[in-house]
Image: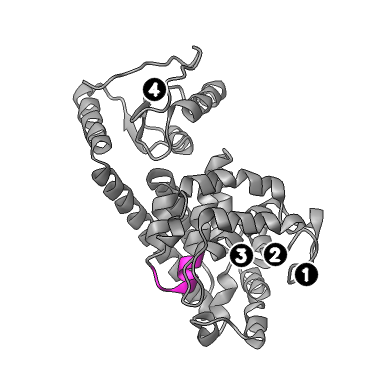
Amino acid sequence: MRPCQVVPLEAALPDSGPSDVTICDVALNRVASVTRLREALSRLHAPGNPLLCLIHEKNHHLTMQAQAIGATEILQIDGSHDALCTRLIELFGLVEDDGRLDERRRRLARVGIVKAGLAFSGMFDAAATGEPVSPELLEQGSDAVLDSVRQADIRTWLDVVWNHDDVTYQHCLLVAGLAAAFAQKLGFRDQDQRLLSQAALLHDIGKAQVPLDILNKPDRLTPEEMAVMRTHPVVGHELLLRQPGFDPRLLDVVRHHHEYLDGSGYPDGLRGAEISDLNRLTTICDIYAALIERRAYKPPLSPDHALSIMVEMGGKLDQALLHAFRAVVAAIGPGASEE
């Protein structure tokens, strides 16, 4: 038998440390209960371990709320004691066999990456030929990223994405995964998690119209090539302006994700309050992804090294948000990109 501890939400939280498997049976339609549950999970649940959330009716809102608190499994309580026992046995089996748990996470990550990758490719191919970019594809792709990072964890997501050779594909999925993890660590509401993930997945859509010999060049770009590459924010923004269906906040990110708080960014030299919070968040994920990604002409930086470089950028980035981003870096683990 495995040790089991029942923790009522109204009771003082124990100092027993994180559990192998956490089971939540809480009224997720009550704000106070969810707030208290988040506090309890921050103490009693280790990220990456199974988190089984029980819901008492088939309800989309309850399901989304369970996902928002990080549930890796959601089970509807319908009077089937056997179903609950069977799933618990399976979950404890995964904990006892780290290899099985790792493989399960990789499988979840691969499924999410395939779904997000297909959505991204569909949008990118449409943009390359001047056809309308589908808002529905963006929603499908961002939801796949959010679900996968929530269930598989950010480290596994990055490990799988790093195996892809296409530079733009790899970069945008890295940024989207980091943005999803960041939004979840910040405790964003579901709609705000989705908005940030969509911004990350869409931010480089303008690169679809950059010549392939520049976009896929295996070496560093020349100054002339870099000037062409730097047109992608304006190109992407103008492309999406010509069609309906996209949140103006997303268009702002497509145009301004290379702006810096000190005014030294491009294309419009925005500074300070002119740069939205959504842009600040996306820019942090964008820069971090570029530092840890694997390129033929440069070795990837370790998670901690990449973060230290961004800290040294000082007033260019929102340092308060960057400090909060440390939680994502911690979840990736030391030396992850160099393995």
Which range of residues does the magenta coloring cover? 164-171
Q: Which mark is nearer the camera, 3 or 1?
A: 1
Q: Residue at x 21, y 28 (%)?
A: 83
Q: Is residue 96 above or below residue 228?
A: above
Residue 141 visible to an observer of this rendering: yes
Establish if 336 lies above or below 100: below
Residue 204 in which image quadrant = bottom right
Q: Earlier in the sequence, mark 2 or mark 1?
A: 2
Q: Nearer the viewer, residue 184 or 324?
A: 324
In space, the residues marked 2 and 1 are separated at their CA atoms by 8 Å
Give the amino acid at mark 1: Asp
The answer to which quarter of the image holds residue 226 is bottom right
Residue at mark 1: 268
CA distance for labels 4 and 1: 50 Å
Q: Going 65% across and 49% down the picture, which residue do you hit?
A: 322
Q: Secondary structure at mark 1?
A: loop
Mark 1 Cα shell of 10 Å, populated few (<14), some (14-19), many (≥20): few
- Whether the residues at callouts 4 and 1 have beta carbons within 8 Å, the answer is no
Query: Image check: 271 left or right of 246?
Result: right
Task: Return the mark for residue 244.
Answer: 3
N-terminal label among 2 and 4:
4
Q: Dot 2, how many residues are within 10 Å of its Cα: few (below 14), some (14-19), or many (20+)?
A: many
Q: Which residue is mark 4?
A: 25
